[in-house]
Image (cartoon, rainbow, N blue to C red):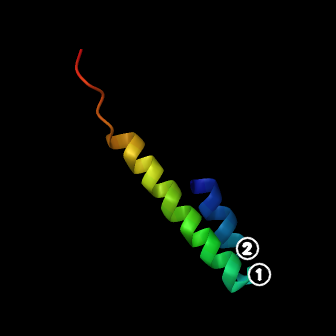
């Protein structure tokens, strides 16, 4: 996620509005995946 954020920050001025919207959606999806993975509780055995 950090690499994606850095890449987008460096290229944001060159991206079209559609590309920026897609990047925004992608970042939100990735953040949600990370959150779900980090907060997932495995059943106790």
Q: Are marks 2 and 1 in contact (CB under 8 Å)?
A: yes
Query: Which quarter of the rendering shows the N terminus?
Result: bottom right
Local SS, label 2? helix
- What label does residue 14 carry, if any? 1
Question: Which image quadrant is residue 39 in?
Answer: top left
- The image position of residue 41, as x and y in percent, is 29, 33
Where residue 34 sits in the image (x, y, percent)?
Answer: 45, 48
Which residue is under mark 2? 11
Task: Give the image location of residue 21, x and y in percent.
Answer: 61, 77
**Residue 4 left/right relative to 13:** left
Taking the image as shown, residue 13 lies to the left or right of residue 1, namely right
What residue is rendered at 24% in x and 14% in y?
45
| Disc 1, SS | helix
Q: At 33% from the left edge and 38% from the top edge, which residue is drawn? A: 40
The residue lying toward the viewer, choosing from 33 and 14, is: 33
Classify residue 35 as left or right of residue 15: left
Q: On residue 3, which mark appears?
A: none
Q: Nearer the viewer, residue 13 or 38?
A: 38
Establish if 15 lies above or below 1.
below
Compute the Cα span from label 2 to label 1: 5 Å
- Furthest residue to the left? 44
- Pointer 2 local density, CA inside 10 Å: few below 14, some 14–19, many at least 20: few
Tell me how many marks there are. Answer: 2
Residue name at image x 54 percent, y 63 percent = 27
Q: Where is residue 32 drawn, in percent x and y?
A: 43, 55
Q: Quadrant of residue 8?
A: bottom right
Residue 8 higher or lower than 40, as above or below: below
Spot the residue most to the right. Answer: 14
> Relative to residue 5, is residue 14 drawn left or right?
right
Other residues around mark 1 within 10 Å, as few (<14) / some (14–19) / many (≥20): few
């Amino acid at each position: 996620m950090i690499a994606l954020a850095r890449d987008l920050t460096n290229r944001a001025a060159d991206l079209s509005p559609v590309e920026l919207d897609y990047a925004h959606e992608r970042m939100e999806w990735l953040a949600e995946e990370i959150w779900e993975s980090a907060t997932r509780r495995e059943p106790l055995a």
